[in-house]
Image: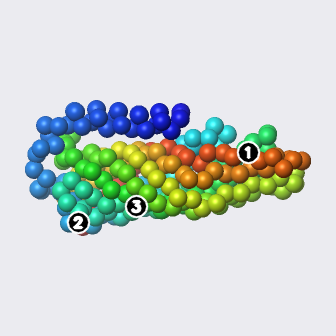
Amino acid sequence: MGRAKVVSVLVGVAALLATASVARAQQSMGGVGDVTNRWGVGVSLGYAIPQENDADSSFYRGAVITYGLAPNYVVQLDIGYLSFSQSAHSIDYGDLQGFPLMLSLQWRHPYSIGTSPAAWYLLGGVGWTFWNLDSSDEAPRLGVEASADDAFAARGGLGFDVFFTDNLAWNVEGSYTFSARDVKLIEPGTNDSEKQDSDYWLLASGVRYYI
């Protein structure tokens, strides 16, 4: 799926959600589910799916800190870990390990699931991904090289909070991360190189505790 299609999908889903919840979004933000002027901390586990077809998907784990700036706006800081295997020319080059550090802004809308207060939000942000390529045993033996540089990143996505109490919420978040740099793979016996996309989809779920 190309980047233009990715953006179109995110915009389309956001528009559907906005239409479905327009009436409920006008309800009071006070009480359970209101995170204005409150800190939040959380952990999440999920699945990262690389845009590059020759890379395998990865288990994701991360931590998050949030702060409610206003009734509809929350700033969010994420740090996580993921690892994609890299292969080309029928060679296993190793694992591309990433530590994304992202600063994002949520645009929140109150909602409810039955009697449970909830909120869905659009998410957009920028940050930096610290990449490290852990080379396989096969690549050095064949005299081939691979490299990956740390890179600026940007992401967009959607998320949900469902509150069990005023402090504890279950969170689900889906996003697409654009990475400014690719992985460079050198072909055996040549000076030719192949660049592989390091963009990825991320679907994660976890708990958040609001103070």
Give, as a three-letter code, the residue at label 2: Arg
Q: Distance of mark 3 from mark 2, alpha carbons?
A: 17 Å
Residue shown at 20% from the left, 60% from the top: 70
Viewport quadrant of the C terminus: bottom left
On screen, residue 89 versus residue 103, left or right, reads right
**Residue 166: x percent and y percent?**
19, 58
Which residue is at the front of the view, 56 or 191? 191
- Residue tagged 1: 194
Callout count: 3
Which residue is at the front of the view, 37 or 178? 178
On screen, residue 117 versus residue 85, left or right, reads left
Give, as a three-letter code, the residue at label 3: Leu
Q: Disc 1 or 3, which lies upstream in sequence? A: 3
Crowding around mark 2 (Cα neighbors within 10 Å: few <14, some 14 to 19, many 20+) is: some
- Residue tagged 3: 103
For label 3, the SS is: strand
For label 2, the SS is: loop
Residue 139 visible within the image: no
Crowding around mark 3 (Cα neighbors within 10 Å: few <14, some 14 to 19, many 20+) is: many
Residue 53 visible within the image: yes
Q: Distance of mark 1 from mark 3, alpha carbons?
A: 31 Å
**Residue 124: x percent and y percent?**
37, 51
For label 1, the SS is: strand
**Residue 120: x percent and y percent?**
27, 45
- Residue tagged 2: 38
Give, as a three-letter code, the residue at label 1: Glu
